Amino acid sequence: MGHLTTHVLDTARGQPASGVALTLYRNLGEKYALIRDAVTNSDGCCDEPLLEGSAFTVGRYRLVFAVGVYFSKAGFALPDPPFVDEVVLDFGIADATADYHVPLLVSPWSYSTYRGS
């Protein structure tokens, strides 16, 4: 069985983003169901996979990263409202036997993501 993981990197400071709150949802068509909340550790990762085992199924998902709060706590002088506040990533899992890694590279002014390994 596969699993879902994430990794948040602070590109403004060139280091892992520790303490970023994130939420994972599953798309149910007209609405999203909350699966879990997590916070990144000192390596910018979560301590365990976000999805694994029988919970790791084919479907559409959403990850929401609270990066505005993270950068504010890190001492960045952000405008009100911040340019990048919550990063919302919608993605699909097409193969429940594969590993899906969703990294987020983020600064107060931009972000990017990709399917990692």
Image (tube, rainbow, N blue to C red):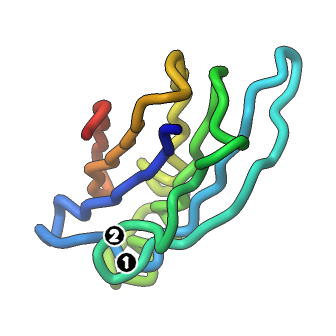
**Distance CA(mark 2)–CA(mark 1):** 5 Å
Task: Name the kind of residue labelled 1 in the image.
Answer: Ser
- Left or right: residue 19 compared with residue 115: right
In the rendered image, the quadrant that contains the C terminus is top left
Q: Are marks 2 and 1 in contact (CB under 8 Å)?
A: yes
Task: Name the kind of residue labelled 2 in the image.
Answer: Gly
User: Which badge, 2 or 1, comes first in the chain's sequence?
Assistant: 1
Q: Which residue is mark 2?
A: 44
Residue visible at 43% across and 62% down?
79
Q: Which mark is residue 29?
A: none
Residue visible at 54% across and 72% down?
39
Q: Secondary structure at mark 1?
A: loop
| Residue 12 percent across, percent down from the top left | 17, 63
Packing grade of label 2 (10 A; few <14, some 14-19, many >=20) is many
Give the camera-side residue of 52 and 62.
Answer: 52
Which quadrant of the view contains residue 28? Answer: top right
| Residue 47 percent across, percent down from the top left | 47, 74
Give the camera-side residue of 24 and 110.
Answer: 24
Residue visible at 28% across and 44% down?
110
Which residue extends farthest front? Answer: 1
Which residue extends farthest right? Answer: 30
Q: Is residue 50 above or below residue 59?
A: below
Which quadrant of the view contains residue 70? Answer: bottom left
Q: Which residue is mark 1?
A: 18
Residue visible at 68% across and 63% down?
37
| Residue 2 percent across, percent down from the top left | 48, 38
Q: Is residue 56 above or below residue 19?
A: above
- Left or right: residue 85 compared with residue 62: left
| Residue 9 percent across, percent down from the top left | 26, 61
